[in-house]
Image: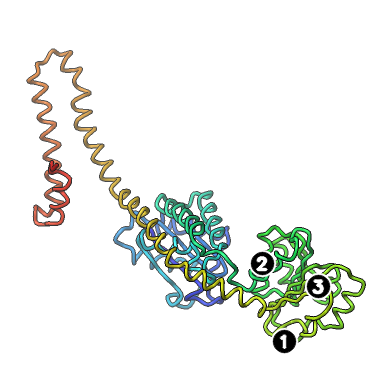
Amino acid sequence: MVGLISINYKIAPLEIREKFYFDNSEKIVFNNLLKKKVGVEGLMMISTCNRTEIYFEFENHVGEEKKFLHTIVKELVDFKGYKDSLSPYLNNLTGSYNVANHLFRLVSGLESMIIGEFQIVEQLKDAYYFSKKHKMLGPILGRMIQKSLETGKYIRTNTDIGRGAVSVSYAAVEQITKKYDLSESNFMCVGLGETSKLSIRHLHRKNIKNIKITNRTESKSTDFCKELGYESIKFRNFKNEIKNCDVVIFSTSSRNTLLSKSDLLEIMNGREKKLLLVDLSVPRNLSSDLYDMENVEVINVDNLKDAVNENYKKRKGEIIKAELYIEEFLVEFDDWTNARSLRPSILSLKKQVRELIVNETLNNIEDYYSEQKNGDDLNSHLSKVYDKFSNNLVKKIKKASNNGKDERAIEIINQIFLNEK
């Protein structure tokens, strides 16, 4: 049996989500704690800006799902030192089918803030390989994650769920890509709001190395640059830095214009190469009189809106197709988990057969021949083995069917044992 505790953007605001963010070192500590105090047999954690999700396996606690969930939530709250009620911000699931359905939808982009976004795939892979490396996974959870990645890949290949920009930040990067050789261009990002961070991360995934970042709060840009390996510059110097840039992205909460026509005239004086300015701010960071300047191109939110809306409509139209594919993969996974639940009984049956038939008959045949016993003695011994095995099986059949009173159990038993053609 597997379960899920999810604190995600749909039900939990940012100030709650950030309290339950886990870095990798915390994941190891929390896993060890749950193994020791709760008895978790497998664990994987995804922790991003949009969600913290704890996937766990607890085969030895079947029938105690609610109690088990409550215990893990209590340990989570204590671990993070959270004093208030977490219940309003939690989504809990138990059962392999239910948890797999959520995970398959998640990796396919159906549970993301932006439908079809691909970042969640890399986040899931990172979480999976981390858990695998540190021997945190159980067999069912490991199989579920592998199947989810197979599902996500198939859906992204066979639908248009992930095609076309549906965020302003990504649409801006797509527009820049059409106009510039990214590997040869110099970038600067002014401001570190959520949109700006997303834009920088989109560029980072395209292996762009030449990016400078500035922000009024210098510590924010310094920390962010350390994470991605970029250069942080002081905010008061950003206008001088534009002289060496090909593309400048503005995304701040400033209510005042950050770049005027006179500023830009000075910057462009003696400059031959074109400058692309991208203004993702509302209200705009760039003066409206910059749009007709020679050798300068300005892209703003309104320029990107039509492309975003059109692509979003296309993606929404692919949801039903993706859900149908998910159902097919869920059936395959459900068949595997159901078959696996029979494994203990099958192994037990094989063990009994080996002990009774192999150990008590085949291993003793040589003794009968060496002691020159007749065939009647061997037949008598085999009859005793048969009686012992069949009597034990009959007792179990009676117990499983409530001595023949459980009609459903009888139907299943008859399917197994009646020799019907």
SS class, disc 2: helix
Q: CA distance from mark 3 to mark 1?
A: 20 Å
Quadrant in which the N terminus appears:
bottom left
- Who is closer to the viewer here, 228 or 167? 167
Relative to 361, say whether 271 is above or below. below
Classify mark 3: residues with Cα within 10 Å, few (<14), some (14-19) or many (20+).
Answer: some
Q: CA distance from mark 1 to mark 2?
A: 27 Å
Relative to 270, say whether 56 is above or below. above
Q: Nearer the viewer, mark 3 or mark 1?
A: 1
- Who is closer to the viewer here, 284 or 274? 274
In the rendering, which numbered label is found on residue 150?
Answer: none
Residue occupied by mark 2: 174
Write the residue at 12% across / 55% down. 402
Write the residue at 34% across / 67% down. 66
Look at label 1 and name its amino acid.
Answer: Arg
Write the residue at 52% across / 66% down. 116
Mark closest to the chain's N terminus, 3 or 1: 3
Residue occupied by mark 1: 255
Relative to 147, say whether 363 is above or below. above
Relative to 91, say whether 142 is above or below. above
Look at label 2 and name its amino acid.
Answer: Glu
Position of residue 284 measured from the top left corner of the image (x, y, whole percent): 71, 83
Write the residue at 47% across / 53% down. 150
Position of residue 167 measured from the top left corner of the image (x, y, whole percent): 60, 72
Left or right, 187 with reference to 25: right
Position of residue 125 measured from the top left corner of the image (x, y, whole percent): 54, 55
Q: Nearer the viewer, mark 1 or mark 2?
A: 2
Classify mark 2: residues with Cα within 10 Å, few (<14), some (14-19) or many (20+).
Answer: some
Quadrant in which the C terminus appears:
top left
Residue 192 in sight from this viewpoint? yes
In the rendering, which numbered label is found on residue 234?
Answer: 3
